[in-house]
Image (cartoon, coloured by chain):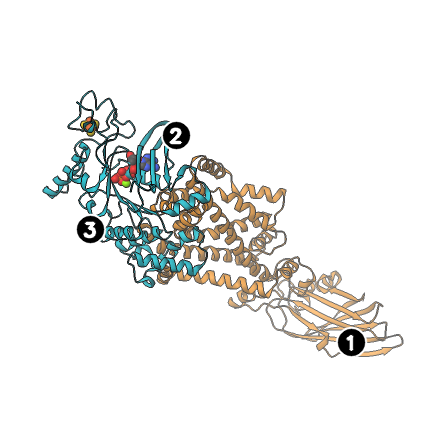
Chain colours: A orange, B cyan
Amino acid sequence: MNRWVQGLRELRGYPSAVGGLAIILFLVALSLYTVITIPYSEALDRWRGGDHWQMNPVNAGPVWADRLLGGNLPQTRVVESDNADVREAPFEGGKQVRIPLTFEYDNEGFPSELNLFLNQKGTQQEAFVRLTWHTPSGETIPLGGQRVSEEDRISISQNRALEGRLGMVPHVGLFAGGSDPADPRAERGDYRLTVDAMLFDPGAELEADLAVYGRVHGLAGTDYQRRNLMLALMWGTPVALAFGLLAAVGTTITTLVIAATGVWYRGWVDALIQRLTEVNMILPMLPILVMVGTLYSTSIWLMLGVVIALGIFSAGIKTYRAMLLPIREAPYIEAARAYGAGNARIILRYMIPRILPVLIPTFVTLIPTFVFLEASLAVLGLGDPELPTWGKVLNDAQEQSALYNGFYYWVVAPAVLLMLTGLGFAMFGFALDRVFNPRLRTQ
Amino acid sequence: MTAEEPLLQATNLHTWFELRQWGFLRVGSVRAVDGVDFELGRGESVAFVGESGCGKSSLARTLLGLHNPSHGDVIFEGQHLSELKGEARRQYLARVGYVQQDPFGALPPFMDVRRLLSEPLIIHGVKDRDERERRICQALQEVRLTQVDEILPKFPHMLSGGQQQRVVIARALLLEPAMLIADEPVSMLDASVRVEILNLLRRIQTERGLTLAFITHDLSTVRHYADRIFVMYAGRVVEQAPVEQLLDNPQHPYTRALLAAIADVDADNALDERDVPDGEPPSLLHPPEGCRFHPRCPQAMAGLCDRQDPPLFEPEAGHYSACWLQDPERD
Ligand SMILES: Nc1ncnc2c1ncn2[C@@H]1O[C@H](COP(=O)(O)OP(=O)(O)OP(=O)(O)O)[C@@H](O)[C@H]1O
Ligand code: SF4
Ligand SMILES: [Mg+2]
């Protein structure tokens, strides 16, 4: 074990080892944080989409990127009736409610969408609401009225009649002030949406939340289903690392044991292993995975199993065999046989440990190749149907023509994380190689 | 030693290595051990000598159960080695310790001394850690590695050659063997520690009453460490005798040549010539007809030596030689 400690100490002298290790530790820490703060079932549930994300904008970029470039695009804000100065006036069999939803707008550009969420409590009766928009310059724009049921959403942005009157989509037109419709500019100042409601039940209560959707959101932005990309980027980390590590461990260990078994028993066992390896080497991994994914299931665990199964008789066997052949004849193995060590013990305890240090660098650099493989499968549309992963984000981005639409962040963030993973493990692996291997060659 | 039952008996022992082409075509056999008979008594030290490639190591490995004999058998404490299976075979392996030539190679480089000495004990079912530690310490004391705490955590490459060989000997002693087989135990060590190690082996052998069979090229020191000598030639034992008789009164022409070669080397103090007699070592694939030494023998008798294989004659009590010259019925 001393040799390991000494080797690790020596690693500190390699900037690439330190850098690589820092990246790996960052990814591991991010994974742990993610798994602890967002439980697995919750992550799957959220990624399925739906109401959880209704307050998020669609296809918003990351905030920091906009601010870094000196921009001031709006973030989503929600104006709630709870904080508003609500007036009520009862009448025979019901009451009249006026909710003024006031907010200050001082961003560049326009919101991406306007929605009003209404929630009527204490009655089964439909209510009637009329909306009025007040701009900072004192203009008053009636937005029309409609019946609402218990829980309802009024999509102001979808109001075609209003769009016709304004000559622009509502979430632009309502903020454009008097500016030129061909080149609208947002008017800054205090806006107000007045909700006038007729509730046909004296005990009824009405809550109204106005969502003024922004154009930037959070650290990673959102996708076309309003999902926060951060969820997939974060959860993609443990998934990628686990897949890479398990696949690397699984293939390395099985390959090593099989190679050592062949070398130890020689004869037909070795010949059989060699032939199987040669057959397996010409079997293309990716098409087989695509076939399994298309015909059977794209579960990540199944893919992991197939990857390991295909990796068992991989080309690594040839390399390991070449390394193990001289070890087979080592006097210490003859000594072990002479004091009664059995075949399994010799293979597992005397042959494999001898080459393990040499394999560690290869093993470390093998991890990202499996991470990339998993991402490639996802990009090909064969990602796990449930799990949020980096590859899935890329796949969605591709399907929604993210780059064509200018949603660069949708592609860049998962790509950067993938490259970071590759870089971290590669840097660390190369440094390990330099530290561990020369010594072993001379030993 | 003849009174009681011998510890080990080799009867008509053959170890042939089949040479195959393309993994299956038999093209012949290397007759590394080719018909060897001897008995080793309890508590006796014997030396095997002979030039390189005559089958000494192959014989040792066969005795250790590392090669299966092609014919004949090894009988140890009355049991036939070829009939031992499973647990009984492992018990046999515990009764015979092995000391190899290359002490560094004989120790797994990735295990520290504690670990590598624990291995035989673990394999032989000593589950209690303290018990293992106790036996390891005892064995290390016995090979004079007294700084036990210092030695145990070290890896083989941190030890000197002499220390490595002491660890190898300690490992061979751990399982309380009745016999030690040492294959050139000092030939890869520094000259300064050779005598120490040989003395150590001799001391352990007498103290424990072990049977010690060691292979050596060094006939000059063999007198001090062996009771009997076996001279091997081309897979056969051609002469065997108590050490004094053999060295002072060699019978077989090959033994004489061997002793003369050593004397030459000593006289010239030359490093160029090996300690071997003149002529080509025989092919073990196609050994010569008749006496295997006849192509090199200065006393070869045409018509006899190249036709008939000499049996073992006993020119004096306990001194055997496979040479027609010792045939009492000759002329
Ligand atoms: N496992 C094996 N397979 C095939 N041939 C072998 C094997 N082991 C030994 N031999 C051959 O058997 C012959 C005897 O070898 P062995 O190692 O017994 O000689 P030796 O007397 O110990 O020689 P040395 O003094 O050089 O150690 C040699 O020709 C060798 O090539
Ligand atoms: S039998 Fe003949 S050839 Fe062989 S050693 Fe004796 S004399 Fe020489
Ligand atoms: Mg040898």
For numbered disc 2, what is the local secondary structure?
Answer: loop
Q: B91 or A287: nearer the eye?
A: B91
Task: Give above or below for A226 relative to A196.
Answer: above
Label 3 sits on residue = B191
Task: Give above or below for B17 relative to A208.
Answer: above
Label 2 sits on residue = B22
The location of residue A163, given as percent across then percent down, is: 72, 62
Question: What chain letter is assigned to the residue under label 1?
Answer: A
Instruction: Confirm if mark 3 falls within 8 A of ligand 1.
Output: no
Q: Residue A98: give its label.
A: 1
Spatial CA distance of label 3 from label 1 is 108 Å
Which tag, 2 or 3, sits closer to the chain's start? 2
Quarter of the image with the N terminus of chain A in it: bottom left
Residue at 83% across / 67% down in the picture? A126
Amino acid under disc 1: Arg
Instruction: Confirm if mark 2 falls within 8 A of ligand 1.
Output: no
Quarter holding residue B226: top left
Tell me whether the residue at label 3 lies in contact with that at label 1, contact meaning CB atoms closer than 8 angstroms: no
**Image side of residue A154 versus residue B37, left or right:** right
**Image side of residue A387 versus residue A144, left or right:** left
